[in-house]
Image (cartoon, helix red, strand yellow):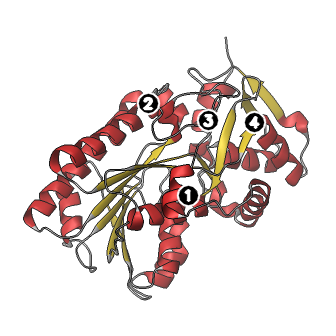
Amino acid sequence: MTSFAPECVLVTGGAGFIGSNFVRWLLAREPRVCVVNLDLLTYAGNLESLADVEERHGVGGDGRYQFVQGDVRDFHTVRRVLGGAMHAAPPVDAVIHLAAESHVDRSIMGPAAVVDTNVRGTLTLLEACRAELAERARPFRLLHVGTDEVYGSLAPGDPAFTEETPLAPNSPYSASKAAADLLVRSYAQTFGLPAIVTRCSNNYGPYQFPEKLIPLTITRALRDEPLPVYGDGHNVRDWVHVEDHAEALWAVLTRGRVGGVYNIGGEAEAQNIDIVLSLLRRVAKPESLIRFVPDRPGHDRRYAMNIGRLRAELGWSPRHRLADGLAATVEWYLAHRPWWERVLSEAYRAATTLYLAERG
């Protein structure tokens, strides 16, 4: 397997949950690598999540980190960033594409915005990379970060998703991510763009915007507010700690097969209701806070990821046990209450609109 050693990595959506954790993880472990973070700072982008990174690695630190506020759908901005015109680092030689609208509930409320960001944004990035490399050819890789939701839903007892599982997205969000995956594949096949796709299971950990299940449960429980649980609560997800995901992304970027697809998962399946009950116990709150609400339209029943390819080719396996990771995540939210309290009104908007509003 040919290794790739980038000097300057562009992270799109680097102020979001996975992006900020990846930026922090990379700068801490690769002392010769520079990182440029391109983020529009929409509702889930939060520069507070990178305050320690800015202090340590920004202009007042070792200078290896730079933030650029911009839209991945803006071709000219992306081209300038790739060429080095908007930052002090060398020209970009690797891209981790994380910029996306990532919440299924919001895609149900407004599909057009999700499709525009996830599909047009990916297309614009691909075109900008192609134009940049046509003008200044160099060793280069683009890693497009996808989701297990593109595979659809599994029944109990079905084998886990592999990279050969047919795509069968069931929500506007997952459909937009499947379209983006296929655009990346098409640019690799048609134009020879050196690109790789990953598909990851549900992430959890520090700095997650409190609209997803785990931070939503923690923050609402700490405020003694009702905890909405869809349907019967028996939907199953595979959970991976965000730091394990960061390590996997770097392994795929630097050692993965160009043109390939890699599943990333935590090998930690759990029912949603069991996650909620575990979190309630950890914050010493009563089960009476739980409110079972009508199921989400198109709600996939079960996800499970086969990570055999990633383990066999690149030697990666998840390091965090789910129980330990949940405990550490609860402790982080307890210790960082000001961080999440500042974003609660926007974080709860989708929850209130979809399943906590009064129903006629």
How far across and down, in percent of the image, does residue 169 sit?
A: 46, 28
Q: CA distance from mark 4 to mark 1?
A: 25 Å
Q: x, y (%) of residue 120?
A: 27, 40
345 and 6: which is toward the camera: 6
Decide which of tag 4 and tag 3 comes sooner along the chain.
Answer: 4
In the rendered image, the residue lying farthest to the top is: 360
- Circle number at residue 303: 3
Disc 1 is placed on an element classified as: helix
Q: Secondary structure at mark 2?
A: loop
Disc number for residue 167: 2
> Spatial distance from mark 4 to mark 3, Cα to Cα?
10 Å
Marks 3 and 2, how far apart in space?
A: 13 Å
Relative to 109, does residue 312 appear above or below in the rendering? below
* In front of the other: 146 or 51: 146
Residue identifier under label 4: 271
Left or right of 178 in this view: 348? right
Q: Are marks 1 and 2 in contact (CB under 8 Å)?
A: no
Badge 4 or badge 1: first in the primary sequence: 4
